[in-house]
Image (tube, rainbow, N blue to C red):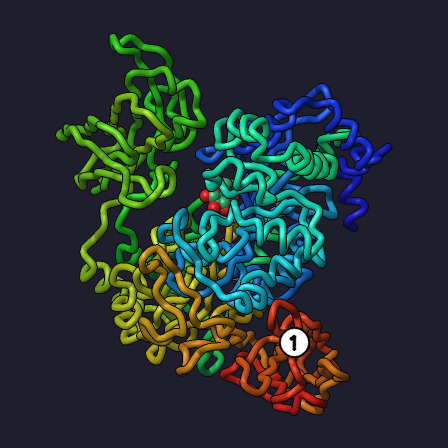
């Protein structure tokens, strides 16, 4: 379907009728008094903005982003499509794929009556230890900028606003609300601002989100130099700049810096305080008018002001077959073959397969944080492989424990004791113990902010029965800040759980659990008292971890007996999470030992890594193949099976460089020193600054066929315009090659300057012309842009570890 047909279907056309945006906006501004205008500039709630019938302004609804449209509720909201994560999308190296992601998100948004999707995230992979990399595309600014531009167009062509975030230099999570990013001007311009600049120039995102951190001493939300200066004046940005959630601390400074909207609401540092600041003359009323203008422009663009949009009546369910097919392809095509000795992959004519590892059963489909959505299902890798190869040929072994925290209990493990439905019963009582309300909750956690009915309670009780078939050793307990009593048969305890140090109230919950054998139907009861502030309260339940030696022995036994072993390892949301950074790149638990034991026992070993960001692979020489599977979204297992069997070529190329050893990278620690994160490596981010041989280079990826390159030519005048090369598929399967062009100017770091994808049948050749734009051919010097002189070499490379042709840049 074309963007125009989509527009009509998603109700945008009606929003546009009779539009005379700027005159309408001026009239509306004149019709409001100061209080009325300022009221519009803070959220009405967590994810909505105020409506104003007097000017025909409807409520504008926001939702995170960027891998699905969660809706305006953070915890236990409605079910929505869960897409592959940003790195997996980026590994296609295909702007068309990024545009498809944007288009799909626009449909998901329209089906939930959401006007603004809070994505894409364009911060860079500066250190592999950063916890939130899974949400952003790459370590390379050009690749990131091009994908972000296409993603924004995909959304906005269908009348849903994108939010490019987080502006700017938000590359670590540790102390993210206070850290001061110290970045020199050249680095900021050439690297960290570049994705924003490209998106503004190429797609005009209707909103941009200012980050939590400080940039060179000034909070990103108060940063007049960057917001008013660079973004609005220099780049001519006409959209709205909002704060990250709870990021704004000042009143006049932020309002004067160019920030247009503070989120969330209804409280916040603007409101009455900003009215007073205007009255005192600290903020000009024309400044307020400009913020309102930008807000109404956004509202007009999304069909909430002027003519209102009609939302579509027919929408696809998140588990509709059409969605499932698309999501599977999006995930499988971005997966990356890192190693493939003796063409072990794709799996054809295999006999029996031992599928080993916790990630095969509890496949990790997404990272943790605001990006989380509640998918209709997650196809596990176990189920995906059984479906593809036939269950009778597949033996599944659980593997070693991979988590420390008991995450929110799997819905399948708990049921409401009254109704028998999956979930739990939540009962509130007053100070005298009298019942206020009792409700079924179809989730295993509740948020006090998003469930107002919990607010007046003196005590809140969470209760559930265990839905297991036989006596099982389980780890059960509670999660969330508060004073608790917790009981299961033969166990009762009182416990106080405090906020986890330096983590938020939402993303990392304190917990207390016990491990014990429990019977089917055993009741878990947890009661807590009312406490101020936003809390998430949850029951924990999972099968109790086995000792690693026992799990490894079982894994090796199964591997020995099968014709091939597929070991599935990975990270969990404990590592790939907003608000926390990693302390190591090693796989959690005893997974490395498990892979080695399996490789020693098996005839052939394929490792599937279910993670978005680099891990160490000390067993790399012991195994036959490695498939990098990312965080594949709701169709995870089906996509992994499609990639392993070659139903879809895993044609991904890495979007970040993988360190070979702990600490072996140009930038490493995510921990600020004296409150500062110094970007001392300058523009030499990622592969550009790598001094040693990494485990895998940015751009690496084998796919399932072989490629040869010949007859390359640089087309240049004063800058490089394009590079032409003849590419041939010299392998035995059809495949997609990503022709990558790098430039190594004299005395400057090497950098990606362009790429093109080409799909060829075996034996086919094509002349590929890779367009090269100016973005990475210029230098910020003395307060302005200069072209970089055309010196040095141009490389055609499948990642810097596999350079195929080298030519002088001057053509
Ligand atoms: C994140 C943003 C997100 C916002 C709203 C913040 O914690 O940094 O990316 O959009 O929350 O959920």
Which residue lies most toward the front here? 281
Residue 60: image x %, image y %?
64, 32
Q: Nearer the viewer, residue 421 or 534?
A: 534
Q: Is residue 348 left or right of residue 312?
A: left
Q: Is residue 39 left or right of residue 444?
A: right
**Which residue appears at 41% of the width and 47% of the height?**
177
Q: Nearer the viewer, residue 681 or 589?
A: 681
**Where is mark 1, residue-wise?**
777
**Which residue appears at 53% of the width and 85% of the height?**
802
Residue 772: image x %, image y %?
70, 75
Q: Secondary structure at mark 1?
A: loop
Tell how many labels: 1
Q: Is residue 614 left or right of residue 66?
A: left
Q: Nearer the viewer, residue 459 or 523?
A: 459
Q: Nearer the viewer, residue 787 or 450?
A: 787
Which residue lies most toward the right here? 18
**Which residue appears at 62% of the width and 34% of the height?**
112
Residue 791: image x %, image y %?
64, 88
Residue 14: image x %, image y %?
81, 33
């Amino acid at each position: 379907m074309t963007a125009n047909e989509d527009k009509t279907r998603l109700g945008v056309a009606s929003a546009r009728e009779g539009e005379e945006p700027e005159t309408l906006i001026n009239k509306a501004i004149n019709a409001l008094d100061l209080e009325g205008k300022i009221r519009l500039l803070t959220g009405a709630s967590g994810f909505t903005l105020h409506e104003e019938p007097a000017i025909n302004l409807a409520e504008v609804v926001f939702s995170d982003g960027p891998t699905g449209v969660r809706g305006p509720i953070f915890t236990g909201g409605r079910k929505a499509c869960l897409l592959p994560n940003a790195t997996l999308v980026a590994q296609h190296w295909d702007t068309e794929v990024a545009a498809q992601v944007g288009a799909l998100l626009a449909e998901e948004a329209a089906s939930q009556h959401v006007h603004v999707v809070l994505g894409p995230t364009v911060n860079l992979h500066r250190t592999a230890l950063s916890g939130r990399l899974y949400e952003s595309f790459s370590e390379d600014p050009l690749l990131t900028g091009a994908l972000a531009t296409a993603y924004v167009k995909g959304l906005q062509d269908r009348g849903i606003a994108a939010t490019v975030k987080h502006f700017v230099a938000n590359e670590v999570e540790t102390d993210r609300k206070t850290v001061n990013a110290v970045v020199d001007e050249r680095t900021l311009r050439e690297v960290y601002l570049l994705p924003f600049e490209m998106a503004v120039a190429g797609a005009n995102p209707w909103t941009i989100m200012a980050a939590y951190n400080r940039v060179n001493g000034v909070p990103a939300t108060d940063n007049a130099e960057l917001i008013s200066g660079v973004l609005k004046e220099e780049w001519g940005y006409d959209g709205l700049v909002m704060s990250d959630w709870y990021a704004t601390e000042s009143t006049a400074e932020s309002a004067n810096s160019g920030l247009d909207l503070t989120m969330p609401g209804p409280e916040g540092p603007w409101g009455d305080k900003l009215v007073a600041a205007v009255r005192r003359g600290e903020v000009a009323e024309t400044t307020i008018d400009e913020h309102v203008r930008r807000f109404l422009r956004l509202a007009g663009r999304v069909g909430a002001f002027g003519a209102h949009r009609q939302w579509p009546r027919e929408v696809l369910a998140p588990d509709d077959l059409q969605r499932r097919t698309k999501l599977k392809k999006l995930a499988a095509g971005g997966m990356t073959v890192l190693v493939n000795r003796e063409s072990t992959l794709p799996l054809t004519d295999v006999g029996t397969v031992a599928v080993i590892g916790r990630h095969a059963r509890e496949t990790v489909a997404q990272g943790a944080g605001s990006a989380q959505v509640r998918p209709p299902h997650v196809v596990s890798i176990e189920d995906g492989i059984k479906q593809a190869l036939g269950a009778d040929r597949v033996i599944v072994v659980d593997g070693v424990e991979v988590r420390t925290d008991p995450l929110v209990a799997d819905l399948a493990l708990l049921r409401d004791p009254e109704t028998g439905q999956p979930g739990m019963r939540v009962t509130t009582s007053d100070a005298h113990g009298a019942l206020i309300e009792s409700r079924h909750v179809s989730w295993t956690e509740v948020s006090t902010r998003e469930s107002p009915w919990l607010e007046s309670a003196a005590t809140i009780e969470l209760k559930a029965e265990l839905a297991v078939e036989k006596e099982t050793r389980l780890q059960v307990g509670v999660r969330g800040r508060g004073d608790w009593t917790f009981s299961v048969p033969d166990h009762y305890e009182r416990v106080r759980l405090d906020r986890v140090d330096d983590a938020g109230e939402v993303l990392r919950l304190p917990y207390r659990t016990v491990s014990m054998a429990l019977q089917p139907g055993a009741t878990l009861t947890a009661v807590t008292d009312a406490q101020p502030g936003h809390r998430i309260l949850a029951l924990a339940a999972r099968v109790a971890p086995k000792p690693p030696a026992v799990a490894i022995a079982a894994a090796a036994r199964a591997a020995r007996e099968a014709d091939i072993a597929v070991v599935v390892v990975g990270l969990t949301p404990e590592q790939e999470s907003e608000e926390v950074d990693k302390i190591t790149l090693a796989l959690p638990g005893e997974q490395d030992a498990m892979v080695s034991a399996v490789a020693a026992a098996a005839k052939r070993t394929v490792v599937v890594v279910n993670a978005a960001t680099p891990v160490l692979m000390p067993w790399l020489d012991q195994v036959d193949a490695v498939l990098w599977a990312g965080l594949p979204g709701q169709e995870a297992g089906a996509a992994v099976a499609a990639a392993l069997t070659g139903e879809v070529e895993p044609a991904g190329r890495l979007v970040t460089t993988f360190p070979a050893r702990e600490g072996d990278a140009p930038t490493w620690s995510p921990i600020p020193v004296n409150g500062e994160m110094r970007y001392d490596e300058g523009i030499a981010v990622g592969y550009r600054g790598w001094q040693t041989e990494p485990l895998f280079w940015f751009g690496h990826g084998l796919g399932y066929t072989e490629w040869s390159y010949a007859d390359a030519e640089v087309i240049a005048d004063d800058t490089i315009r394009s590079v032409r090369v003849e590419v041939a598929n010299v392998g035995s399967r059809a495949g997609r090659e990503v022709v990558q062009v790098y430039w190594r100017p004299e005395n400057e770091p090497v950098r990606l300057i362009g790429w093109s994808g080409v799909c060829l049948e075996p034996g086919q050749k094509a002349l590929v012309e890779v367009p090269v734009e100016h973005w990475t051919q210029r230098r910020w010097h003395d307060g302005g842009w200069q072209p970089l002189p055309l010196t040095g070499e141009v490389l055609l490379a499948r990642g810097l570890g596999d350079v195929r042709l080298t030519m002088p840049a001057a053509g």
